[in-house]
Amino acid sequence: MSKIDRMMIQGIRSFGPEKGETIVFTTPLTLIVGWNGSGKTTIIESLRYATTGDFPPNSKTGGAFIHDPKLRNEKELLAQVKLSFRSTSGVRMVATRNLQVTVKKNARSQKTLEGSLLMLKDGEKHSISTRVAELDQIIPQYLGVSKAILDNVIFCHQEESLWPLGDAKTLKTKFDEIFEALKYTKAIENIKMIRKERSNELGQLKIIEANAKEDKDRAGKSEKRQAALFDEIEELRGEYEKVDGECTEAQQKANEAYNHAARFEQIVAQLNGKRITFNANKDSVDALQDNLKQMAESDNELQEMLDQYEERIATYVTQQDEFRQQYGDLKDELQQSRNSLGAKQGEIGKYEAQKEQHDRQLQQRENLIKETAKRHSIRGYDYEITDKHISDFQQVLGKMSRDQNKTLDRVREDTQRELREAQNDLNQLNTRKSNLSQSKESARTAITGNDKRISDLQRSMNQIKADEGNEAILQDKKRETEERLGNANSDTASGRFDERIQEASETVRTLEDKKERLTAELGDATKQARESASIDYTRNELQGQQHSLEKMKKVHNKRISQLVDSDWDPLTLETTFQSVLSQKTSKVKEATSRRDIAQTKLDNVNFQMSSLESQVKKKRSELQQYEQTVKGAIQKDDISDFDETLQQLEDDYDATSTDKAKFEAQIEYMRQCLMTAERDNTCRLCARALHDDRSQQFTTAGFIDKLNRIIEKAEINMQGDNAEELLAELEAARNAKPSYELAIRLRDTEIPALQKDLAKLSTERDGANKQLEDQDAVIHDLEVERQDVESLSRDVQTIVHNYNEIIKLEAQVKDLTQKQKTAGLSRGIDAVQADLKKVTDESRNARNALDQLTSERDKSRNLIATLEIRIRDINVDLNNAQSKLKEKRALADRIEELKTENNKQRETMRGFDKEVESLVPEIEQTQYNYDEINRRGNEKVQRAHDEASKLSDSVRQLTQADREINAYIDRGGPQQLARTHRDIENLQGEIARIESEMMEVTRKRQPPLPQSQTCPGDSSNRN
């Protein structure tokens, strides 16, 4: 149960603006008693204003609800009402509302400022909303009481308390608001609407059922037809197979005949080719005979020459193969030797390079020692460098490096102290920036809530199944029915039933023989009339659907062209609409996924920052404890003096201990002197007797008194230097040394490192927030586009439905018209009825004719009554459609208001961004100071570090040079170079030997030229 705890009023009516007055509401009852004008009613009015946002009667303008500024001689005055209550869930909440009144020359202007609603939960404050409109809505929700009950029952004003005695309309309105009866009325309307839709769906389903039965009958006929066609196909397949076999046999015969003819053609072609070859060979023989040279030797001589030539050629070939084999072996051996020589040459190049490198390293080490000694001002290394010089130089350089490292540590400590001071200033500015970011986040939360409400309102608007097309159809039906009613009234007035009865009595005798023919003709005309009526009804329905479609196109063409397709067509509109809607939805999902990734990144950064902040908090708590321990030990406010204080305490204690021993020895000696003087009347130092000597102003009593004063002074000095207290202070300081070291490490190392990580994560968080804002803006724009497209869903369905109905009705009109033309009547039903009436009136008596006319008159009256009832029903449906359209437009206006509110919130966010941007120069300036301190410190540290690095580099270079020089000697570099030289000389001698052998083989391979270049021929050459 909710509960109001207290309320603070400032600047309201009799409550002054200087200081707020607080009223505490106790349980179970709080009584407010006071004089007239003391502010009792103001308390009730403030409670009502804080919970509902409504002003008292006659005080909404002019500043009547606010304290009069003239009483303060001010032009402007602020007022505030703050209410503390507990919600229905027990959470404590604080609502704040602010007002402002400004006095102008002739008038006052009252303005409601931005309020707030804070939730106090788990020790933390959460801002829920700052918009006045939202406060008016959500505060009653947290109280668990509707606004109507707060206004009319709990905080009802005394001037409005007589509403139960008002008129019936006012009472009904009040009770409907209190008991929320409107939602039940809307529920009943929704039930009626659903019943009507289900009735329409039932009628459509019945039509579908009838069509399905017709389709079933047609399917049965098609199945029978299919079976007959299948049998026919089987018969034709058998005939096809028979004819195909005959065709295959004929094809085989044709192929055999073709092959036989091809073989004959091939033989003829071969014969022609042989003839051509014979002629060519004959020509070649004739040409060769002209070019042959005949030799004079005999055939035996020619044969002997031929045999000797072939033997000689065979011998040459054998020798050439042997020489070729020997040459190849030598060539391979030469290649192997050259490869080995190349490898050895590569090795000797490497070894010589290593030797040169070794020599250079020796020279470089000597140069390095001289340069380093000169760079670091080390004397005694300007001339020849020996191994002892090198060892001494390394020791001197190492000591300088260690000293420089200590200097570097001291410079770093000074820099860290200055950086901590600059970091504190930077943290304050970053805190202000974080507060602005939180306000911006609250505005973003409000935008998210508005977007959710926009979605709910959009769904509610889409659920309203009413549009301008339905309204246009109902208006057309109403106009058509009114026209039919007017025609029926005109027909009734101009019926002339009495005259027609009289005319029928006069002509009944002449048309008796036509009665039977006219009766049959009337039957045919009646059947045709039913079809004509169906055509007229269908055409009327078609005109209504066409009119509705044109009205929908006219109303929604612009939006559909902008959002769906500029060249849209009702035939493909639904498919195009679904495609565009799917694309918009996919884009929203993709953008949402990217936003979720950015949100996950932001959550990770926030988690890391939270962990680091908790660590920093813990470290600071530990630092504070350590500092308190150190401060308590050294009795100073700054722990930086710890080392100096500890050293001072140790020096004081040592001095005090020494002085105490001296004082004790002095006192003991003086007491012994005093005892000797009092007992023996002699001086202990010189052992002489004590006598009074007036001339020297010496007396024994004065001497003893002086000894007593010296003893007292020594005792006083010994008591003044309390060694035990100094020892206790020294022990306390020594015990606090670990705390001091931990505090220094926390202050100078650990906490700055954590703060640096926090600054880095803060930058990442700002980037992630910026990315998330961009993603939210993209999602909002895409969601708005998707909602705009989705809002056309009902209108698109209506347009597509109208278009489909038009196609269907046009087909029905065409079918009925065709049937009517097929029937073909010579006259219409009106003419047949007229003739039949004439015949009936003439063949019957006057009473029958009078009854007939009376019946027609009753039919006309019934038609008029039916049309009047239909007009009344159409008016009811039209009023319902207009009411729903009005509600739909109201929802659309509310959506626009929320979108406008979102734009205002975005403007507010941009204002926060500007404030953040205004803080950026200060942060940058502070950051610049921090960076400047850091830069100067880094320069100092860098200079010390550079010097230390130079010393370390010099040590490292000397060590590296020694290592490389020793490594060359250890791996036997000089021996490897000499051995490789010997191997190269051996390989070069082997290569020279192989090349000489190859030249000898080459010389032997050249065969002697034959004595005759003319090859001997056979015996036929002689002919």
Image: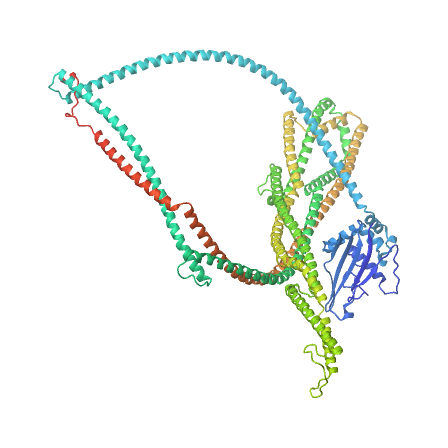
Viewer-nearest residue: 708 or 923: 708
Q: Quadrant of residue 4?
A: bottom right
Is 995 left or right of 491, judged from the image as shown?
Answer: left
Say how the picture is coloured: rainbow
The correct choice, above or below, for 266 with respect to 69 in the image is above
Is 564 left or right of 261, judged from the image as shown?
Answer: right
Query: Where is residue 7 shown, x and y percent of the image?
Result: 81, 59
Viewer-nearest residue: 655 or 66: 655
The correct choice, above or below, for 25 with respect to 719 in the image is above
Viewer-nearest residue: 443 or 162: 443
Query: Where is residue 816 shown, x and y percent of the image?
Result: 65, 29
Query: Where is residue 858 shown, x and y percent of the image?
Result: 79, 33
Viewer-nearest residue: 729 or 311: 729
Query: Where is residue 871 shown, x and y percent of the image?
Result: 75, 40
Seen at 67% across and 53% down, the residue is: 615
Seen at 71% across and 88% down, the residue is: 694
Q: Where the C terminus falls, by quadrant? A: top left
Residue 286 in view, yes or no:
no
